[in-house]
């Protein structure tokens, strides 16, 4: 018998599993069944090419035995088994990258970490230590020369391996339930858990000799024969989710490619939407036989939240991972699935706005990535975009299509304003002109929006433009009283002189109604929201100068003109101009040190009250 030490990271992992993950201890069973199922799938492959495989006629099934009197449990499969090296590497000393990722996430999320997530990090086996103190694994590989081994561990610092006589190919895991997990030694509890998570495992599961799961390829049924309860269970099985899906799509495609697929949209998004490496995805079958779990090549990055199965007759059974990645059949399947899913979402957007809003809130940020990465489907994704808008109440979402239908007869462009949230945007002085003229402005409040929308130059032949830019084409207000041109010119020069190099330029504004000044970006400048995002990603990102627009019809500006005419050196002018500029920065959330602003305000109030 040999004794092995677990690696430091493995010890940490086991410690967390034993001492801090109590929620959903029942997932141990799902993880063990899923490992047995994987091992059986591998054995089924191996049988295709290896005539000398150990136990060629062994039943491809999973046998679970529980003994409620002795609180004992065992699960046995006649799958591919493990060699001694595999025992050491796969459930032993070597900490997998999944272990490290798991530890990182546990640290990040602290107490909120769900035992349920454990299977997503390739550390599912260790979940047995939630319910057992000591675990034995007997195993024998499928190779004709293989030997049997017994692995034992108390889940603390080490494990032992010894050679044993084992007639059968495959693996048997056994243990006694610890005090807190005794409920699982009851038949009915085990049955309940199998029904919940493993009903659709690809192999029969026998509990104390009786078959308890369904083993049906649901996707081969007719669409109208699919029952919602089966769909829910099946979804939970393929996705590891706890709740049912938001919706599903059943495809049966014949022609250039041939496949059936049953895909689901989850109800909730994972906490880290932009990094879905460990998430469940689409499982690939050929002729009802699983050939690859979580086949990433079947979906573009931006649809990785979709779960389910794809079953094709176009790929050979013993296809390798390398071949699936680059085969033309896979590319065709991917292209059809992508386009079907996008149309499916479009139909939700049209017929079930509430459902679509739930979907969009959860997965919209990822979907948008497709606009800059999937040229073929760009237009379809653009149709799926939704935004709040200045003309609709808070919470209501608007598409480009609806926007264009509502456009005023002489309006030529689609307008948007980007920023952190609706409340801040509604206070932006750049909106005043648009509100006054009832011109709709889309509110871009998702961080992703500023990377996406500016890359869509036009929709329905209309330019999509930011109202924060200085060069938008607005009709000048008809003014009752024409300001004196020379006076305006000198006033603008005065502003420039007072602000020195702080702004790129000072211009007469056409867009202001109630506010005296506003800040906009130059023709080639970034919008403030975009600039903020860039600064978040790159600390050295150069802050850009903005253009100050002045509302020359505003009473305050007219007062300044009057003072200027009387005395061009009156110090109140400089004070007011700087105060106006910093006030505009403040509204944009860009006034970093308000000290001078407050000091100047105090001085101005003091002067006003002295009279
Ligand atoms: P994952 O299944 O995500 O790889 P696990 O922690 O569940 O992570 O299992 C680790 C590894 O242990 C598996 O990848 C497999 O190589 C091996 N293993 C676990 N259970 C079995 C089994 N019943 N038969 C053969 N190999 C197994
Ligand atoms: Mg596993």
Image: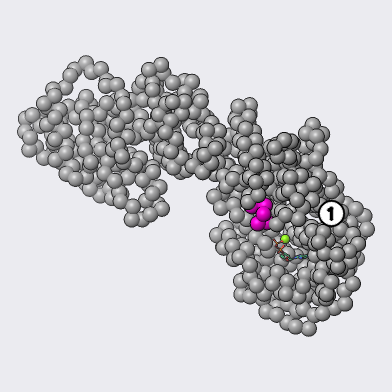
Q: Give the image location of residue 552, x and y in percent.
A: 20, 27
Which quarter of the rendered picture does the C terminus lie within?
Answer: top left
Question: Disc count in the image?
Answer: 1
Which residue is rendered at x = 15% and y = 41% of the image? 498
Asked if the stretch drawn in magenta spans residue 252, the answer is: no
Which residue sits at x=43%, y=41%?
A: 450
Lateral position of residue 353 relative to residue 130, left or right: left
Is residue 154 among the parts visible in the rendering?
no
Left or right: residue 212 versus residue 493 is right
Q: Percent position (x, y) of residue 201?
A: 80, 52
Q: Residue at x 74, y 72 (%)?
A: 87
Which residue ends up furthest to the bottom in the rendered image? Answer: 1
Q: Magenta residues: mostly which secondary structure?
A: helix
User: What segment is highlighted magenta in the picture?
Assistant: 321-325
Q: Which residue is mark 1?
A: 203
User: Helix or strand or loop: what does disc 1 sit on?
Assistant: loop
Residue 282 or 594: which is nearer the viewer?
Answer: 282
Nearest the viewer among 604 and 211 is: 211
Quadrant holding ligand 1?
bottom right
Point out the residue furthest to the right here: 209
């Amino acid at each position: 018998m040999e004794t092995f030490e677990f690696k430091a990271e493995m010890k940490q992992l086991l410690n967390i599993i034993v001492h801090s993950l109590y929620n959903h201890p029942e997932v141990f069973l799902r993880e063990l069944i899923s490992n047995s199922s994987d091992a059986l799938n591998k054995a089924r492959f191996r049988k295709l090419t290896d005539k000398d495989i150990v136990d060629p006629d062994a039943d491809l099934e999973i046998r679970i035995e529980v003994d409620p009197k002795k609180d004992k449990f065992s699960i046995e499969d006649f799958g591919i088994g493990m060699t001694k090296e595999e025992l050491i590497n796969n459930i032993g000393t070597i900490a997998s990258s999944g272990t490290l990722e798991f530890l990182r996430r546990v640290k990040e999320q602290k107490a909120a970490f769900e035992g349920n997530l454990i299977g997503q990090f390739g550390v599912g086996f260790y979940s047995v230590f939630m319910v057992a103190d000591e675990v034995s694994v007997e195993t024998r590989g499928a190779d004709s020369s293989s030997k049997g081994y017994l692995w034992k561990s108390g889940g603390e610092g080490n494990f032992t391996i010894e050679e044993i006589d084992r007639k059968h190919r495959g693996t048997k895991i056994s243990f006694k339930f610890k005090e807190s997990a005794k409920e699982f030694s009851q038949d009915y509890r085990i049955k309940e858990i199998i029904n919940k998570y493993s009903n659709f495992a690809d192999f029969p599961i026998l509990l104390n000799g009786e078959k308890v799961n369904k083993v049906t390829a649901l996707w081969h049924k007719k669409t109208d024969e699919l029952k919602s309860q089966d769909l829910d269970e099946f979804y939970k099985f393929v996705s590891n989710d706890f709740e049912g899906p938001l919706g599903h799509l059943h495809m049966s495609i014949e022609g250039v490619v041939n496949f059936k697929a049953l895909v689901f949209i989850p109800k909730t998004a994972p906490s880290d939407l932009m990094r879905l490496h460990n998430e469940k995805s689409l499982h690939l079958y050929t002729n009802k036989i699983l050939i690859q779990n979580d086949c990433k090549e079947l979906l573009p990055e931006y649809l990785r939240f979709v779960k389910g199965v794809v079953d094709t007759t176009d790929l050979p059974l013993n296809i390798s991972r390398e071949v699936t990645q680059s085969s033309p059949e896979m590319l065709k399947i991917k292209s059809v699935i992508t386009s079907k899913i996008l149309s499916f979402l479009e139909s939700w957007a049209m017929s079930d706005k509430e459902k679509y809003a739930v979907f969009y809130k959860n997965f919209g940020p990822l979907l948008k990535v497709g606009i800059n990465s999937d040229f073929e489907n760009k237009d379809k994704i653009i149709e799926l975009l939704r935004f709040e808008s200045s003309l609709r109440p808070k919470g209501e979402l608007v598409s480009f299509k609806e926007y264009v239908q509502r456009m005023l007869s002489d309006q030529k462009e689609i307008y948007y304003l980007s920023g952190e949230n609706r409340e801040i945007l509604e206070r932006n002085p750049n909106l005043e002109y648009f509100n006054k003229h009832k011109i709709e402005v889309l509110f871009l409040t998702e961080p992703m929006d500023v990377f996406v929308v500016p890359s869509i130059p036009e929709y329905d032949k209309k330019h999509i433009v930011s109202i924060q830019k200085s060069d938008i084409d607005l009709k000048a207000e008809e003014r009752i009283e024409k300001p004196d041109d020379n006076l305006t010119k000198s006033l603008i020069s005065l502003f420039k002189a007072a602000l020195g190099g702080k702004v790129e330029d000072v211009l007469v504004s056409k867009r202001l109604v109630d506010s005296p000044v506003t800040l906009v970006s130059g023709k080639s400048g970034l919008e403030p929201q975009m600039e903020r995002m860039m600064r978040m990603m790159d600390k050295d990102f150069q802050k850009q100068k903005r253009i100050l627009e002045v509302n020359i019809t505003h009473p305050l500006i007219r007062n300044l003109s009057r003072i200027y005419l009387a005395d061009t050196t009156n110090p109140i002018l400089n004070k007011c101009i700087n105060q106006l500029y910093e006030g505009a920065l403040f509204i944009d959330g860009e006034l970093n040190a308000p000290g001078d602003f407050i000091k100047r305000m105090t001085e101005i109030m003091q002067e006003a009250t002295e009279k």
